[in-house]
Image (cartoon, rainbow, N blue to C red):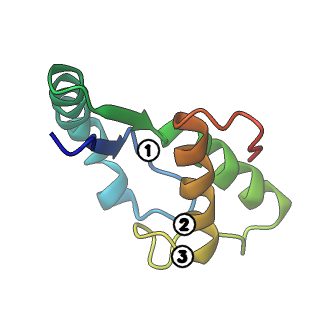
Amino acid sequence: EFGTRMLFLGGFKAGPHMPPAKARIYPRRLAYFAALRRVAKRHDGLYVDVGKGMQTCAVELYKQHPIHSVYSDGGHFNDVGSIIVAGELLRGLGFEWIKT
């Protein structure tokens, strides 16, 4: 009615610096991400899987130096992580010129 679409971000994966106890819960999120994809499809929404790109960047930064992190506390994104997620979101919206 108003020309809007729902957008879901999902597919997040554990990366370096994530506490092992928190990383163990990530496989349980797969069902949640699948449900988001179904809802998006059913209601003409958009599901953007940012997990692989985010994890790739996090691992690459970690390889450069172990102090590099995309997380503020091992699970929530810091400024760098937020920029990477934004790049993945833009890629999901069709801005292929965005490189992360």
Label number found at residue 13: 1
Q: Secondary structure at mark 1?
A: loop
Say which of 59 and 81 sits in front.
81
Q: Position of residue 49 (x, y in %)?
A: 44, 35
- The residue lying at 52 percent from left, 46 percent from top is 89
- In the image, 72: left or right of 35? right
Q: Position of residue 97 (x, y in %)?
A: 77, 38
Q: Secondary structure at mark 2?
A: helix
Give the spatial CA distance, label 3 vs label 2.
Answer: 6 Å
How dense is the environment of label 3, judged by Cα within 10 Å: few (below 14), some, or many (20 and up)?
A: some
Q: Do the CB atoms of the residues marked 3 and 1 lie less than 8 Å apart?
A: no
Residue topped by disc 3:
78
Residue topped by disc 2:
82
Point out the frontmost of discs 3 and 2.
2
How dense is the environment of label 1, judged by Cα within 10 Å: few (below 14), some, or many (20 and up)?
A: many
- Which image quadrant for residue 88? top right
